[in-house]
């Protein structure tokens, strides 16, 4: 087998032009096809930098880059003179394929052209906290009654509109309820305020790029002209804007290869539409469609469970998934009395297996080393559905001295001190970024109390200028204390000096270190966290950002800029020490949401909390069959992450607001184990099985 590919895969990678769809189940090698196809394109003479690939996992993009680099080096294009040695690494400026996520692709497009949409070129990207504060101001400004619409409901509605490509000017005409009408008014205000501040939110990245391409054909042509080939992984999860962006980029040359699996479409709630992949052959007449049926990832019993489970979805493309790996290790169902026992059992199982495999927990004893265990911590993943679940597991893992990394839960970048520091850095790049300015105006305290802040904001509104630009007027604003005036002056002087240094090209790492030091943020930590242990954790977080900035500087060399660093942070395109996925490679157990696990694989997978109300999620229970079908796809994604062993766990009671309540086993357990004829299954589906004592005990164990 050339490249280690089967004939169908080879057919796909050797189809080098025209529209191509690979529609196939989990673990059939779709991502591998994308990787090898990039290599084939390069071999056939396509310039690497004329290839664009959109991927979602760091692992995949790393592999794609590596493979492309290997080929280029092998092609002797970079053979070095002198003592016959050939260069092992690609020179920094060698052409490479552009491999990125949709969001980072859009940031790059917008950095070049956003001025056409009336935004400043030096826009900054809002995080969730910025969005909330903007939503609150918008609601205040339109005098929305508090009980009618809260900031998070407003943000959810705005996000739905943006993901469906609905512009602020269009929202009012499609609003149905009073609440939506109010939200439409607030949406306009929210968007105007963001625009004035030169700030875009995450959904804007996609929607603005889509708008740019639609309204400015020359820009669309220019951007499309950068690439001759476009490849998209996980195409089943594209939302409307992403779909339009792909189309805009590929419509000229039609060299578009998309791969995906309708059974793994798990982002409908984020606006993804599975019709995009199912309608591909209609959108792209003459498209070649390749189906892959052999699963190379999981052992046979795991695939049997996955197949049985997904067949319960009535609306789907029927696909064959044939296991290529033998094995008789039936997935286990681990029943526990409560959630504490669940985490203890799972963690001790992992610990036991690691020890059996020759891995020394807590480091090797003297004279021995951890050199060749048969399993590493990163061979294990604990997958969960909801954000409440990981806490108990984290606690156990820490107690068991097992290294782990939490992905997709509360992010490192959501921490208060990290957000404060990032707000400073955003302000250095874009002084009009009002949410950032308001965030750190008096953090650490510099005398600008609430009264002074209000006076400044009112002054800015009356002048019709961004807040930053009226700070110089502070001395003449009535009701400002001397302390507040001094504070304002100190802040502006400091930010101006950092900006000056940034413009002079001070290395990003040094600049970030300087901002931490000169903002006197350490004093703030001292004030907020008298407990030295707590403070140390915060200090470490700040240090991580400095490290990340320094690592970024090393990677980018002379091309590094603070702006790009912040873009990478915002879009999750991080190549830094906190890069979660790269920590996986360094030997940590992965603790992650099912959504985050898409595309990844692990020898040992623990799918925890297999209960009604968790998986399927309680929101879906009220929302009918379509919602349940999406939860089932999520369960299918979870099951198909496992290579060798799958363990599913459930707790018979689980605490709600501190009180233990009986649970109901997930209907998916009955489905995959062939127990759909069990009367309890019918009762669960009909919603009649809620909270009966010890209900879970009746789930039979297979074998
Ligand atoms: P998912 O739907 O989960 O994203 P996928 O279809 O993208 O899965 P890959 O991740 O590309 O599948 O491949 C699954 C596993 O099978 C990987 O470990 C890959 O290296 C391996 N694999 C793919 N094709 C072959 C093959 N022809 N021979 C042997 N192993 C293969
Ligand atoms: Mg894949």
Image: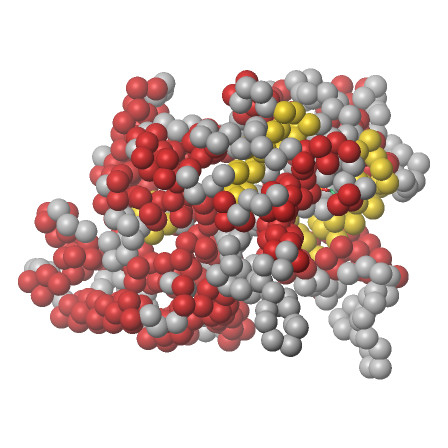
329 lies above or below 403: above
Image quarter in which the C terminus is found: top right
**Which residue is drawn at the image coordinates 45% and 55% (left, top)?**
568
402 lies above or below 571: below
**Scheme of image coloration:** secondary structure
**Which residue is drawn at the image coordinates 60% and 29% (left, top)?**
20
From the viewer's side, name the closer residue of 599 and 44: 44
297 lies above or below 441: above
75 lies above or below 369: above
- Give residue 512's position: percent from left, percent from top: 39, 69
Does any portion of residue 138 appear in the rendered image?
A: no
**Which residue is drawn at the image coordinates 51% and 54% (left, top)?**
95
- Give residue 577's position: percent from left, percent from top: 55, 65
The image quadrant in which ligand 1 is located: top right
From the viewer's side, name the closer residue of 380 and 273: 273
**Which residue is drawn at the image coordinates 23% and 35% (left, top)?**
142
- Give residue 580's position: percent from left, percent from top: 59, 57
């Amino acid at each position: 087998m050339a490249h280690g590919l089967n004939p169908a895969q080879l057919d796909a990678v050797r189809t080098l032009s025209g529209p191509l769809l690979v529609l196939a189940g989990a673990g059939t090698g779709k991502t591998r096809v994308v990787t090898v196809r990039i290599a084939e394109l390069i071999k056939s003479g396509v310039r690497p930098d004329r290839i664009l690939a959109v991927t979602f996992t760091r692992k995949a993009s790393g592999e794609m880059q590596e493979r492309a680099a290997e080929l280029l080096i092998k092609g002797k294009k970079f053979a070095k003179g002198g003592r016959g040695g050939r260069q092992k690494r690609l020179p920094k400026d060698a052409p490479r394929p552009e491999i990125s996520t949709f969001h980072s692709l859009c940031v790059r497009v917008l950095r070049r052209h956003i001025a056409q949409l009336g935004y400043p070129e030096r826009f900054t990207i809002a995080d969730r906290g910025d969005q909330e504060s903007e939503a609150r101001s918008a609601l205040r400004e339109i005098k929305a009654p508090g009980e009618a619409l809260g900031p998070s409901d407003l943000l959810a509605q705005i996000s739905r509109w943006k993901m469906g490509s609905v512009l602020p000017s269009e929202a009012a005409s499609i609003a149905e309820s009073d609440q939506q009408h109010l939200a439409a008014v607030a949406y306009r205000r929210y968007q105007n305020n963001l625009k004035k501040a030169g700030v875009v939110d995450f959904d804007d990245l996609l929607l603005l790029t889509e708008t740019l391409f639609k309204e400015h054909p020359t820009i669309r042509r220019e951007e499309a002209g950068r690439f001759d080939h476009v490849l998209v992984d996980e195409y089943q999860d594209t939302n409307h804007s992403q779909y339009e962006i792909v189309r805009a980029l590929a419509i000229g040359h039609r060299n578009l290869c998309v791969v995906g699996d309708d059974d793994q479409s798990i982002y409908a709630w984020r606006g993804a539409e599975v019709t995009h992949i199912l309608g591909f052959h209609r959108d792209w007449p003459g498209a070649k469609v390749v189906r892959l049926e052999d699963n190379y990832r999981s052992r046979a019993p795991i695939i049997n469970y996955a197949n049985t489970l997904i067949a319960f979805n009535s609306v789907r493309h029927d696909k064959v998934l044939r296991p290529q790996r033998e094995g008789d290790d039936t997935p286990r169902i681990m029943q526990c009395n409560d959630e504490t026992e669940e985490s203890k059992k799972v963690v001790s199982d992992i610990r036991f297996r690691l020890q059996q495999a020759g891995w020394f927990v807590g480091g090797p004893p003297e004279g021995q080393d951890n050199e060749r265990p048969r399993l590493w911590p990163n061979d294990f993943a604990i997958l969960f559905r909801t954000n409440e679940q990981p806490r108990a597991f984290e606690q156990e893992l820490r107690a068991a001295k097992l290294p782990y990394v939490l992905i997709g839960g509360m992010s490192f970048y959501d921490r208060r001190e990290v957000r404060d520091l990032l707000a400073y850095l955003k302000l250095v790049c874009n002084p009009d970024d009002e949410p950032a300015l308001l965030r750190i105006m008096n953090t650490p305290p510099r005398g600008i109390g609430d009264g002074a802040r209000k006076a400044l904001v009112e002054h800015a509104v009356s002048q019709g200028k961004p807040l930053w630009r009226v700070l110089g007027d502070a001395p003449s604003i009535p009701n400002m204390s001397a302390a507040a005036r001094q504070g304002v002056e100190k802040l502006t002087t400091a930010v101006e000096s950092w900006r000056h240094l940034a413009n002079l090209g001070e290395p990003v790492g040094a600049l970030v270190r300087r901002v931490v030091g000169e903002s006197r943020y350490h004093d703030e930590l001292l004030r907020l966290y008298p407990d030295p242990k707590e403070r140390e954790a915060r200090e470490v977080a700040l240090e991580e950002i400095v490290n990340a900035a320094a690592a970024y500087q090393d990677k980018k060399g002379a091309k590094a800029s603070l702006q790009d660093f912040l873009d990478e942070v915002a879009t999750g395109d991080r190549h830094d020490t906190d890069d979660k996925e790269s920590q996986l490679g360094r030997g940590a157990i992965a603790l992650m949401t099912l959504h985050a696990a898409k595309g990844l694989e692990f020898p040992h997978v623990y799918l925890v909390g297999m209960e009604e109300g968790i998986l399927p999620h309680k929101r879906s229970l009220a929302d009918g069959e379509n919602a349940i079908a999406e939860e089932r796809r999520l369960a299918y994604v979870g099951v198909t992450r496992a290579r060798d062993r799958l363990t599913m766990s459930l707790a018979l009671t689980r605490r709600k607001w501190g009180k233990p309540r009986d649970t109901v086993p997930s209907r998916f357990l009955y489905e995959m184990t062939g127990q759909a004829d069990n009367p309890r299954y019918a009762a669960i589906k009909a919603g009649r099985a809620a909270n009966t004592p010890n209900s879970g005990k009746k789930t039979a164990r297979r074998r």
